[in-house]
Image (spheres, rainbow, N blue to C red):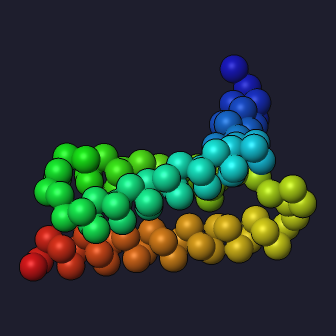
């Protein structure tokens, strides 16, 4: 196998992973799930029920729905949106690392 073809194939696969985005209609689905999860969390907070498993599941649903919103395409996707999205992912990753390190220390 030619080395250049192998490198090109690997580069193409890497670009597919980097450029992965869901279609635009997934953004609406993510918004609906996040609103429902937030409302359920507030209702559980108001009624003061201690269903820890349900709260954990709702937090998980909220995080997944926010992830779906963030990886969904916009109607007018351009280079600026891609740069801003990559910068926000970087900031979110660094913030997540700090939160994990802080919670592990305390």
x then y, percent, for residue 78 = 87, 64
61 or 68, nearer to the observer: 61
- Which residue lies at the image location 78% right of the left edge and 69% below the top edge? 81
Q: Is residue 1 visible?
A: yes
- Which residue lies at the image location 34% right of the left edge and 61% below the top edge? 43
Rendered position, 67 above or below 48:
above
Rendered position, 67 above or below 78:
above
Rendered position, 70 above or below 4:
below
x then y, percent, for residue 102 = 21, 79
Q: Quadrant of residue 74?
A: bottom right
105 or 64, nearer to the observer: 64
Left or right: 64, with 7 as reference point? left
Q: Quadrant of residue 26?
A: top right
x then y, percent, for residue 14 = 65, 43
Q: Which residue lies furthest to the top in this view?
A: 1
Left or right: 69, with 95 as reference point? right
Q: Can residue 3 be seen in this view?
A: no
13 or 57, nearer to the observer: 57
What is the quadrant of the N terminus in the image?
top right
Rendered position, 74 above or below 83:
above
What is the quadrant of the C terminus in the image?
bottom left
Number of numbered discs on residues:
0
Q: Which residue lies furthest to the front in this view?
A: 47
x then y, percent, for residue 11 = 70, 42
- Which residue lies at the image location 67% right of the left edge and 37% below the top edge? 13
Q: In which quarter of the image is residue 89?
A: bottom right
Left or right: 45, with 14 as reference point? left
């Amino acid at each position: 196998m030619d080395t250049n073809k192998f490198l090109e194939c690997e580069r193409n696969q890497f670009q597919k992973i980097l450029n992965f985005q869901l279609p635009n209609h997934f953004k609406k689905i993510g918004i609906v799930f996040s609103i429902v999860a937030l409302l359920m969390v507030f209702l559980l907070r108001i009624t003061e029920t201690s269903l820890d498993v349900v709260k954990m599941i709702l937090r998980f649903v909220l995080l997944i729905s926010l992830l779906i919103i963030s990886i969904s395409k916009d109607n007018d996707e351009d280079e600026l949106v891609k740069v801003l999205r990559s910068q926000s992912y970087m900031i979110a990753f660094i913030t997540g690392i700090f939160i994990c390190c802080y919670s592990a220390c305390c």
